Amino acid sequence: QVQLVESGGGLVQPGGSMRLSCTASGSPFSIASMGWYRQAPGKERELVASIPSGGSTSYADSAKGRFTISRDNAKNAVYLQMNSLKPEDTAVYYCLAVITRQGTIAPYWGKGTLVTVSS
């Protein structure tokens, strides 16, 4: 089994910053790409940022210039640094890891962490 656990959500004022973390744990596996998605109330889940194991990062237009994704392969962790937060960034943020395990590649999701941007 593989588990992803997110942390770092909460309430922040507009213009503030927040850092989300996600760590994968479980039986032996290797991680290909990792990423962050978010789902706002009444909206579909959308990609925020992604980072492959050895390539360049990519961001949604709404995140460019404000958010930074990074990963620590030794810790099986991915991070999302969010700056200049806006009320429209309010959402549940989900971590995704594409994992190879026992010869099978599959996506694994965390349970999500709520980020609320409000004064």
Image (tube, rainbow, N blue to C red):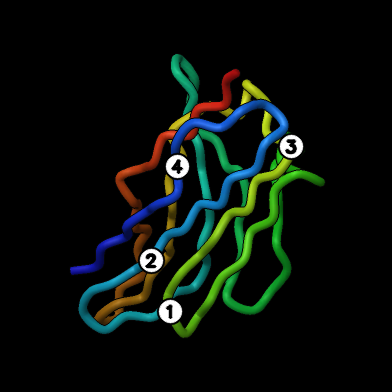
Q: Secondary structure at mark 2?
A: strand
Distance between the Cα atoms at labels 2 and 3?
25 Å
Q: Amino acid at mark 3?
A: Ser
For label 3, the residue is 84
Where residue 54 appears, x then y in whole percent? 64, 79
For label 2, the residue is 23
Q: Amino acid at mark 1?
A: Lys
Q: Amino acid at mark 4?
A: Gly
Distance between the Cα atoms at labels 2 and 4?
14 Å
Image quadrant assignment for residue 97: bottom left
Q: Is residue 56 above or below residue 16?
A: below
Crowding around mark 1 (Cα neighbors within 10 Å: few <14, some 14 to 19, many 20+) is few
Q: Secondary structure at mark 3?
A: loop
Left or right position of 7 against 12? left
Q: Secondary structure at mark 1?
A: helix
Q: Is residue 77 above or below residue 86?
A: below
